[in-house]
Amino acid sequence: MTLSKHWQTLYTNVNLATMTDGANSYGEIIKGALAISEGKIAWLGKVSDLPDVDSSVVDIIDGKGQWLTPGLIDCHTHLVYGGNRANEFEMRLQGKSYQEIANAGGGIVSTVSATRKASEQELLASALPRLTALHQQGVTTVEIKSGYGLDTLNEIKMLKVAGLLAEELPVTIKRTFLGAHALPTEYKDNAEAYLDIVCDEMLPQVVSENLADAVDVFCEGIGFSLEQTKRVFDAAKAHNLPIKVHAEQLSNLGASELAANYDALSSDHIEFLDEAGIKAMKKSGMTAVLLPGAFYFLRETQLPPIELLRKHQVPMAVATDANPGTSPIHNIHLMLNMACTLFRLTPSEALAGITCYGAKALGLSESKGQLAVGYDADIALWNIEQPAELCYQFGVNPLSRLIQNGQQVLMNESA
Ligand SMILES: [Zn+2]
């Protein structure tokens, strides 16, 4: 047997939730093993099928019957920002009106002004604990959006900080340019002039400095119209950047269908998405990204159309939407639980949402989000007896080891 001669690490005596079967099942391998070579998964299967392994060459780790899953993927966050909105949260609960809160400088305007004031180092320092929290919960890949700078200098600053986070922690960061997140106050009556800057100044600079992997737009009555969204999509397409969209959160403007025409990666939020939009998404191979944290925090009542998404077999991802205004939540385990309790996803659907389908929403389905030969060795080991435990409870962290690109990056003896 020579098969194992290039292996560096072998996890044996583990159960695997490979997540290679979409949301249909965990793709379990009971009493299994998984081998890593040069940062990739080199072999996996039943222990009984293991070839002879030379323990003088291969680092063999006894998983003691614990479960291996792909490293978790948070495919939608805004976790780089200045300040926070606790003051506004408190004012609202004291019964203050939206106008009073706005007069006191609340809302997205306050985050934009705090983000503009903060230096790169300050933004990095405030984002680091948020990313650390996700990392310690088993997250190995995070998407981070810009969108609180709303001018060229500060949008670029946010994307640079998002990139710097990958030097601080062993987490893969994918960056999304969201210049069309909101209108800055200086352009509040002139959206077209602001979009000129987004499309003709910010985007070319973002592309020339290679600062983004995708482009996103907040298409909504309080965001940008369908026509304005189309402008940004055209600009993204001209630069060959994939598209994502904040769509159908508070109303149905048809942004998911529009995005489907541009072969977008994902449509996110989608509480008000209709069947025509779902069919268009299915046809173009898009992923639906569910954000239960924002649904919860805003106390929304319109549920996303889960049954129709299932009927048309549109992949459903789940993410934190970590942001200061509508989802100040940096807990992926809580999202698993909320996806099940609030949206009635099954545990295997929820887990697929933060593994294989989280990867798909980022265009990474060929390299991440599954335990399969040739995939990146981003792997989490959990002290659980069955995968549903990851969705069933939160607050106790059962992560015992985390591996990124084949390297062990976390170990928790007490899990
Ligand atoms: Zn968002």
Image: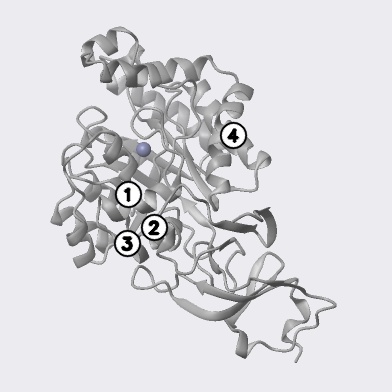
* Labels 2 and 4 touching (C-beta < 8 A): no
Relative horizontal placement of residue 272, taking residue 86 as reference (left or right): left
Residue 315: image x %, image y %?
32, 62
Judged from this view, the residue extending furthest toward the front is 414
In the drawing, what numbered circle is on residue 391? 2
Image quarter where the N terminus lies is: bottom right
Image quarter where the C terminus lies is: bottom right
Crowd rating for badge 1 (residues with CA inside 10 Å; few <14, some 14–19, many 20+): many
**Disc 4: which residue:** 128
* Labels 1 and 2 touching (C-beta < 8 A): no
Say which label, 2 or 3, has the lower sequence index.
3
Foreground tag (2 vs 3): 2
**Disc 1: which residue:** 338
Separation of disc 1 and disc 2 at Cα?
A: 8 Å
Say which label, 2 or 4, has the lower sequence index.
4
Foreground tag (2 vs 4): 2
Identify the element where label 3 is drawn.
loop
